[in-house]
Structures are given as structure tokens and as C-alpha cells.
Image (cartoon, rainbow, N blue to C red):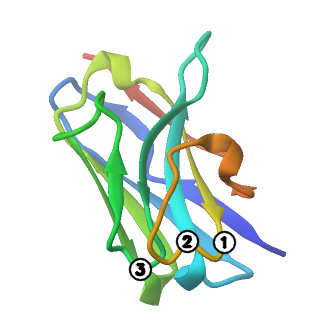
Amino acid sequence: QLRLEESGGGLAQPGGSLRLSCAASGFTLDYYAIGWFRQAPGKEREGLSCVSASGGSRKYAESVKGRFTISRDNAKNTVYLQMNSLRPEDTAVYYCAAVTREYSYDYASGLDFQYDYWGQGTRVTVSS
């Protein structure tokens, strides 16, 4: 059974940091592009960052560029999202998603509808 599980969420102070993990089980992430998304209460799901299967292509939304960093460790079958300089507006449920296509080795999409597998999410709250 293919499964993605996010972890690392919690409460952080403004200006603080958290590192989210997205661990895969039941399949290897080697051939999958991975995206991170979030959804705040009352808002649409937002694409944050994505990385190609090779790790060579990474993209960031303007809202997180310079603050968040996506990385992957295929040996651990895990993708990370390092979040620094957190703001109250970063409060949301964060999801990772995976997709494999013939182009996924070198390309990752920031569009949620292009992803096939999703985790259950991890909640991040940024508040003093």
C-alpha cells in the first residue's frame, strides 16, 4: 500500500523554524516528484514547493521563497521542508504529495491536481 506520512508540525513562534518530513512507505520515492502544499482555514490549497525525482529541479512559491527549503534524501525515502522565519500567516495544515510520470525525473509541478498520492497532513501553528 502506497502511503505518505507528514511529520514535524507543531507550534512555532514568529521568526522560528520547523522542519517537516514526508516519509514514503510501500514504494520508493526515487522516481517521484514531490510537492508540498498547505491549506489554511477558509482558504484554498496553496502550492509551496516542489522537487523533481532527481532533486535537480526545485521550485518555490513567492510566499515562501527565501524562507523555505525543500530537500530529499532518497536513501531514507523522505522529503523535507525546512521552514525558517515563520510568520503567523504560515499557519495551516501542510501536505506532501507524490507523482511519477515520464518527465518527473527532471520536472516537478506546483499544481496540486497533477499529484496522485497525498499524505494526511501535519498542522503548523505560528503564534506567540
Residue that carries the numbered disc 1 in the rendered image? 101
Q: Determine whether, in the image, residue 21 is placed left or right of residue 41.
A: left
Q: Nearer the viewer, mark 1 or mark 3?
A: 1
The residue under the point 61% across, 20% down is: 44
Q: Give whichever of 61, 8 is nearer the camera.
A: 61
Q: Is residue 52 above or below residue 110?
A: below
Q: Is residue 32 above or below residue 75?
A: above
For disc 3, the neighbor class at 10 Å (few under 14, some 14 to 19, many from 20) is some
- At label 3, the amino acid type is Ser
Residue that carries the numbered disc 3 in the rendered image? 54
- Mark 1 and mark 3 residues within 8 Å of each other at the beta carbon: no
The residue under the point 34% across, 59% down is: 58
- At label 2, the amino acid type is Ser
Q: Secondary structure at mark 1?
A: loop
For disc 2, the neighbor class at 10 Å (few under 14, some 14 to 19, many from 20) is many
Instruction: Return the mark for residue 12.
Output: none
- At label 1, the amino acid type is Arg
Q: Give whichever of 54, 15 is nearer the camera.
A: 54
Residue 17 x, y percent position in the rendering = 22, 42
- Quadrant where the N terminus sits is bottom right
Q: Which picture quadrant has residue 9?
A: top left
Residue 67 x, y percent position in the rendering = 19, 40
- Mark 1 and mark 2 residues within 8 Å of each other at the beta carbon: yes
Instruction: Return the mark for residue 104.
Output: 2
Q: Is residue 1 above or below residue 113?
A: below
Separation (CA) of disc 1 from disc 2? 5 Å
